[in-house]
Amino acid sequence: MGKAERETPAGRVGGASPEAVDAASVLLLRDARDGAGLEVLMLERHLRADFAGGALVFPGGKVDATDCGLDAARWIGDNPARWRQRLGATSSAAAQGLLVAAVRETFEEVGVFLGRREDGAPVTDEDLRSRSFVAARHRLCDRTQAWDWRRWLEDEALVLDLRRLRFYSWWVTPEGQHRRFDTRFFVAKLPSGQTPTADDVESTEVSWIRPREAIEAHERGDAVVIFPTRRNLLQLDEFASVDEAWAAVTADAVDQRRIQPTMVRDGDEILVQHPDGGPAEPI
């Protein structure tokens, strides 16, 4: 806890906090190989990561300025103006930034490209293993210098397919954290012919896991799954297949409210409280 933080009489932890920055995260789905339920792709963050180090998370990250200015020839999908209100974005450009960031971060962190070639040809594992794609992913992962991937997309005749994304949920980091994100979560189906891989910078490994199994691993102490991730997994666990989940999300039959929990103190322990109430939980 920083010196600026304090405990309110009700146990709420407050104080000065940075503004939450826009971010996007993707729940990448596939049906379980044994035909029983669906699986979601999760990555284990490096312990040295500045946010959620060591935790099981979905691929994602903050929106970059370049995400908001992608040329119309480099993406297909609904006009971002139609996404603006649904995503609570400040502008159509900001809405586009959230969608583009979701695709970029999925490629960067787990090596899955939600898009195609200009001529309609799919992106395959052969493409993802090519020198050009490997170099592009490496440069996106490089934390020592920023890289604008827009020229690369043009050179490779690549088009982001924003139709592959469905808005799933919206979580804001509680006040009192040293880094805060205003994160829109999306779901996407694993593209045929692509195999996820870890980036070795943000993540140590990637794995397919049933939502309930991830929650149970956290409850046993075998994994760290932070509060909003657990809640997203609980909602996802309601669906028996990818098609069922996709239909529900497409019909907006999921909780898409802007949810900002609060941090509360219970003795020496800091917990997180959902705005709907209920027992406070570990962060």
Image (cartoon, rainbow, N blue to C red):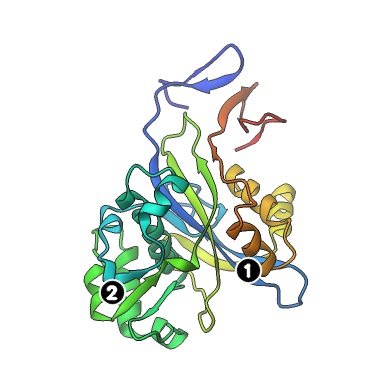
Q: Mark 1: which amino acid?
A: Trp
**199 relative to 250 in the view: left or right:** left
Disc 2 crowd rating (10 Å Cα; few below 14, some 14-19, many 20+) is some
Task: Relative to 119, say whether 57 is above or below.
Answer: above
The numbered dot on residue 208 is 1
Mark 2 lies on residue: 153
Task: Relative to 149, say whether 168 is above or below.
Answer: above
Q: Is residue 62 visible?
A: no
Q: Residue at x 71, y 68 (%)?
A: 241
Determine the image quadrant of residue 5. top left
Secondary structure state at the residue bearing disc 2: helix
Q: Residue at x 48, y 55 (%)?
A: 25
Could you tell me residue 21's position as x and y percent? 37, 42
Could you tell me residue 256's position as x and y percent? 57, 46
Q: Is residue 139 visible?
A: yes
In the image, 24 versus 51, the foreground residue is 24
Disc 1 crowd rating (10 Å Cα; few below 14, some 14-19, many 20+) is some
In the image, 84 versus 155, the foreground residue is 84
In the image, 180 versus 184, the foreground residue is 184
